[in-house]
Image: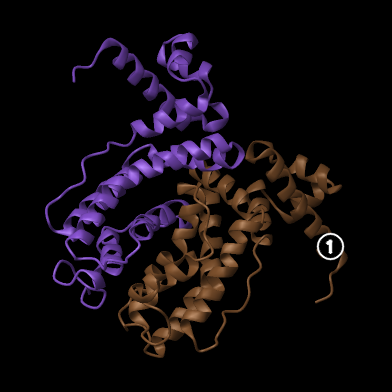
Chain colours: A purple, B brown
Amino acid sequence: MPVTRGEGARRRVLEAALEVLGADGLAGFSMEAVARRAGASKATLYRHWPTTGALLVDAMDATFRPFPAPDSGDTTADVTMLLDAFVTLVRDTPFPKLMAAFIDAAEREPALAEMHADLTRRRREPLLAVLVRAQRRGELPARLDLELTTDLLTAPFFYRRFIAHHPIPPTLVADVVAQILGPHTPGTGSTPDDRR
Amino acid sequence: MPVTRGEGARRRVLEAALEVLGADGLAGFSMEAVARRAGASKATLYRHWPTTGALLVDAMDATFRPFPAPDSGDTTADVTMLLDAFVTLVRDTPFPKLMAAFIDAAEREPALAEMHADLTRRRREPLLAVLVRAQRRGELPARLDLELTTDLLTAPFFYRRFIAHHPIPPTLVADVVAQILGPHTPGTGSTPDDRR
C-alpha cells in the first residue's frame, strides 16, 4: 500500500507523540505538545483522535509491528520466534516507556485500561494462534488452557522488565518455552531436565 | 514489640503517603504534601527519609505484610497459600496503585528501579524458600531453575492486573500452580490434565 499524504501526516504525529512521551512522560503529554512537535494543527490531531487517550493507544500500537503467526509445523520454533520478537520490542524500542506510562494512567482512567486491554488482546493473537494449531495437531493436551498458557509464556518478560527490574538474559526465551511447553511437546523441544 | 511514639509517627506518615499517592498520583507526591496530610513537619520527614523515593519505597513496603514461609510439608498447599495472600494484596489493598506509580517512575529514575528491585526480591523470598525445600525433598527436579519458577508462579498475577486488565478469577491460583508445578509434583497436586 503506497503511503498517502494523510498517512504520512498521521505517522508524523504518532512519532511526535512517542517523542513527547519519552521526553516528558505522561505529565507533559497533551494534544498541544504533540501538535507543536509534529508541526501540525491541533484541529488536525482532533480530527484523527478524539482524546489524548486514543492518541496514546495509537502511538503505542505504532511501536508494535504485528506479523502473521508463524506456521512452520514446529511449535517450539514458532513460539520462540514470537517471544524473541517480543523481547526485542521490550529491550530495544520506546514501547516499555509508553507501557509504563500507560500502566499508571490506567489506574486513574478506566477508558485507558480498556484500550490497553484491547491492545494486549491483539498483541497476544499470533501466539495464541500457534498454540491453537499445536493443540489441534495433538502436541498439547486437549484440555490445556491456552489463554493461561499464553499468559505464562509472556508474563515473565513483563515481570522482569517492570517489576523485578532484571535484565533479560539471552537464554530466557528458551528457558521459559522449555518450562511451559517442554513437558507437553515431547520431541519438539527440550524439557526442563535436559536443558543444562 | 510495643509501638513507640516514634514508630506511631512513622506509621502515620506512611499512611499519609499512601493517601496522597492514591488521591493525586505520583505527580502530586511531595514531602510537603505528605507532611501536610500527616500533620508533621517536613524536617521530621527528612529525618527518616532523605528522598521522596525512599519514602515511596517504605510506603509501598508498608502495604505488604510479609509472613514466614509456610512449611506444612505439602508444596502445593504452601505455594497456594502464598499466592492466595498475594492475590489478596493485588485485589484488595492500595498496593497495585502504588506499584503502577512506581513502574512509571522507575523508567525515569534508576534509583527507584533499584529500590523496587530490592522490594521485589524481599517479596519473593517466602515462595523461593518453599521451592528450595521442595527441591531438597526431591519433589522438584534437582536442576529446575527455582528463580525462573518463582517468576512463572507470580508473573501471571501482575500481568493480569497491569497489562491485560483482566479480573483474577478465584481459580487462577490453582490453575497456575497446576500448570507450573503439576507435572513435577506427582501425588502432591493436580496435573494440567486432571484439573477439569
Residue appearing at x 43%, y 68% in the figure: B175
Q: Position of residue A107 (x, y in %)?
A: 59, 42
Amino acid type for the residue under numbered disc 1: Gly
Lateral position of residue A96 relative to residue B43, left or right: left
Q: Position of residue B80 (x, y in %)?
A: 52, 74
Residue B28 lies in quadrant:
top right
Q: Is residue B6 above or below residue B51?
A: below
Where, quadrant-wise, is the N terminus of chain A in this rendering?
A: top left
Residue named by callout 1:
B8
Q: Position of residue B145 (x, y in %)?
A: 34, 73
Q: Is residue A189 above or below residue B92?
A: below
Lateral position of residue B11 relative to residue A154, left or right: right
| Residue B41 shows up from this direction | yes
Judged from the image, the secondary structure of the residue bearing numbered disc 1 is helix
Residue appearing at x 41%, y 90% in the figure: B137
Along the viewing direction, whichever of B30 and A3 lies nearer the viewer? A3
Lateral position of residue A13 relative to residue B8, left or right: left
Q: Is residue B66 above or below residue A82?
A: below
| Residue A101 shows up from this direction | no
Along the viewing direction, whichever of B33 and B93 lies nearer the viewer? B93
Where, quadrant-wise, is the C terminus of chain A in this rendering?
A: bottom left
Residue A80 lies in quadrant:
bottom left
Q: Position of residue B65 (x, y in %)?
A: 66, 68
